[in-house]
Image: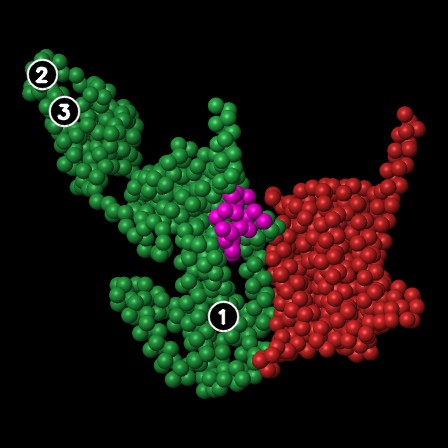
Amino acid sequence: MWWSVFRRLFKRHPSVSSRPSPPDEPARATTDRGDLLEQLELLFNKSDDMRLRRFQLGDSGGRRCAVIFFKGLVDSDRVEEAIVRPLITWSYAAEKVGGNQTRLRDICDRFVVASDAKQVTNAHEASDAVLSGDVLFVFEGDREGLAVSNPGGQARGVQDPILEVTLRGPRDSFTETLFINTSLIRRRVRDPHLRVAIQEIGTRSKTSVALLYIEGITPETLVNEIERRLDGIELDGVLDTGYIEHLIEDEWWSPFPQHLKTERPDKAVAGLYEGRAVLIADTTPFALIMPTTFDSYFHSPEDSYDRWLPVNLLRVVRFIAALTSLVAPSLYVAFVAFHPGTLPTQFLLRVKAAREGVAFPILVEALLMMFFLELIKEAGFRLPSPIGQVFGIVGGLVLSDIGVRAGIVSEAMVIVIAITAISSFSAVDREMGTVLRLLGLPILISTSILGLPGLVLALILIATHLSILRSYGVPYLMPYPYFRIGDMRDTVFAAPMHHRQERPKHLGAKDKRRLRKSKEVADSKDEKGGSR
Amino acid sequence: MRENDKIPPKALAVMVVSAIAELNFLIAPRDVVDAAGRDAWLSTVLAIVVLLLCAGIIITLIRRYPDASIVEIATRILGKPLGTIVALSYAIYWLARAAYVLQAQTWIFAQSLLPNTPLWVTSLYIVMISTYTARHGVEPMARLFLIFIAGYLLPLFLMIGPSYEGALLDRLLPAMEDGLGPVIKGVWIAFSEAPGLSILLILGPFLTGFRRALSSAMIGVILVAIPAVAVMVIVVAQFGTLDVVQHVFPTLALVELIRFPGFSGFRVDPIFLSVWLLVAFTSIALSHYAAASVSAGLFGLNNDKLPIYAIAGALAMWSLWPVALPDLLNYGLRVRIVAIPVAELFLPALLLTVSLIRERSLSSTSERGA
């Protein structure tokens, strides 16, 4: 921050007259009324992947025209079938009967075989269309063209989710193609009120970003706020929803994620039905769900598919695991180093015996083990998956065994760190698991200074931060504050589906009811029948 | 006041518990038993009645000035000079209270858990977190403290349950054997051990409404009252009056007695003390915020950022005052028995009375005019 202030203070601003045209701005086609084809040729003259196919409509005296597209972005074969061949065939036939219409509107309406085509009126629009994967048809010397949608190119198909694996539930996951993703959601929400607002973000990447919400459920204030934040983004390229997430979140400096990320369409749709909004970007298989609360990072889509009793047990396990990953090393340090009297005597003697011969103080021992854990995890991720798994197991075993034998760490510390690692990996959301595990480090340092009070103080600090945090105006710790009974039905404990009749109040959904009991449904049907 | 910094009236219960409950649960039994003997429990019950009365007075007062904090309330009722003095007194009172709890807490840690750690380390750490909490306003505090309520009720529940073993309830009877005098003295002491209700005086502008505000405040008082009476009963029943006054912290001595079968050598008092830090912290943070809020009002500041940092500095310096724990407790008691009844009962009652009288005189003047 100080460096940026310093730079601002001493930065020399060039005078306006001497200022050269900025080379770092994205190349844009001019919008003056010249020959569109020439302008585009000039604009893309160094792009070898651009294809320009000139042809003539009719035998002699016909107008010369061209199609322009980028190889790989469109289906090249279909360019011939859908645009070039129908036009050439028609033009020869028309010439024989003496009429050769060359108005773009007529061509668009009568001869182009494509689901979507639109007229572009200047070079700027034309270049945008070509870059986003359209085929541009243009007459030589004309100022207008026809952008024909002809999607193609290579795209990954719908596959199993990789990070959010469940035993029960749908197996499809988002892909890198925006409209495949929106279709996966549409299949689950056959409601005309599902709105998909698409806009381009990224001055150079022009990434298509879709904001999805259900009109009548999602509060308008939320939609407006998201749109306002998206409009404020001026970034050159958006390569993943992560870019957008970092730019629109409420508190950028917080370690806690403020958007729920998912690769599962069912999870995104569950969010929509609760009154949240979903953001999908082209070229990324991860959708953002907003607003989010701390609680939602521990909910798995499976929780709604399985029986409520085992689900409750698993949720409690997840929450305990989260707490364990946060405080396990600190508790060990506090009890062993500061308050050994709190431990049962037999256990304390064993722990003390295990620590005999360990060369380092307990804090250094804990830090070393935490470092080893992160090292093995990081290396395991980077290696190809079969080797990574073997490396993780062998590396963990060998390092801990040798560490114990060499007197670097004690057996008890190995167990504590292993429990921490397992607990953090049991989190439903990978990012939240990592955040909690890493927050264990400042807690550990606080504990190593003040013992148990230090641990409590560090937890107070984290709890204070969580209570301050908001996601799109919704307090992060909702619904726990003020104990709204209706909202508490899907938190640490999940009530049976019969009792989850209302959407969470804190999300401010317009249509509050999501489930009507069978008797109410029957009554309402009777009423409708009676009124008829 | 920040955007969204509003709390529902039912959150007052949480704020009242957070404001009142602090180290008094550790300190008060000795002082009250010293004053009232075996009737300490009765004095505590009667002190709670006084606390409920205080809650009634303060809620009635802030309801009459719904958008006003103590600075505006006092100024409107008593005029600018007197009102400013009253508001300033409250700012100093809350600062002193936060500093006292902070200092006592750090001393308790130093004596019980962290003998080798300098006092200032704990003290500054707590002040830093208190500043961070107070900096973000009342609404996040209310939500945070609601979660901390578990840290208040759970240790008490876990302590009181096992402590019944070996407790002799006969030690509580007969009641009022020495007459009414010790009981009344005990009421005074017990009431002086429960400051915090006056913090309601700054919360008026933050409330979304006043419906059920009184009942919420009273629920808060009762949530403190029931464990307080239970602790008093169990302490006297377990140790007897003579032994209670020998302990600096009888409640802690009670915790030390707890044994779990199968866990030989297992002591829970460090855990109890550490968890109880949550309770002490809430009253420190609330008092910190209250002092800063009044200071901002006195200086006419729209933002309480600067006063919060200034109060944090004052708090840190005050808490580092070199005074030993016994002196701190004795001196604290002498100040409390005067300051707390004045700040929590007499001043609000005075403000309410003057306000009512002025209103009546205004209405009679207007009737005459009509």
Q: What color does chain A have in the rendering?
A: green
Identify the residue under disc 3: A87
Q: What color does chain B have in the rendering?
A: red
Q: Label 2's element?
A: helix
Amino acid type at mark 1: Ala
User: Do marks 3 and 1 both belong to one polypeptide chain?
Assistant: yes
| Residue at mark 1 to residue at mark 2: CA–CA distance | 84 Å
Whether A67 is drawn above or below B175: the answer is: above
**Residues rendered magenta in the picture:** A485-505
- Mark sitting earlier along the chain (1/2): 2
As drawn, the label of residue A95 is: 2
Q: Which residue is drawn at 64% across and 52% down?
A: B142
Categorize mark 2 by other alpha carbons within 10 Å: few (<14), some (14-19), many (20+): some
Identify the residue under disc 1: A328
**Residue A324 left/right relative to B336:** left
Disc 3 to disc 1: CB gap under 8 Å: no
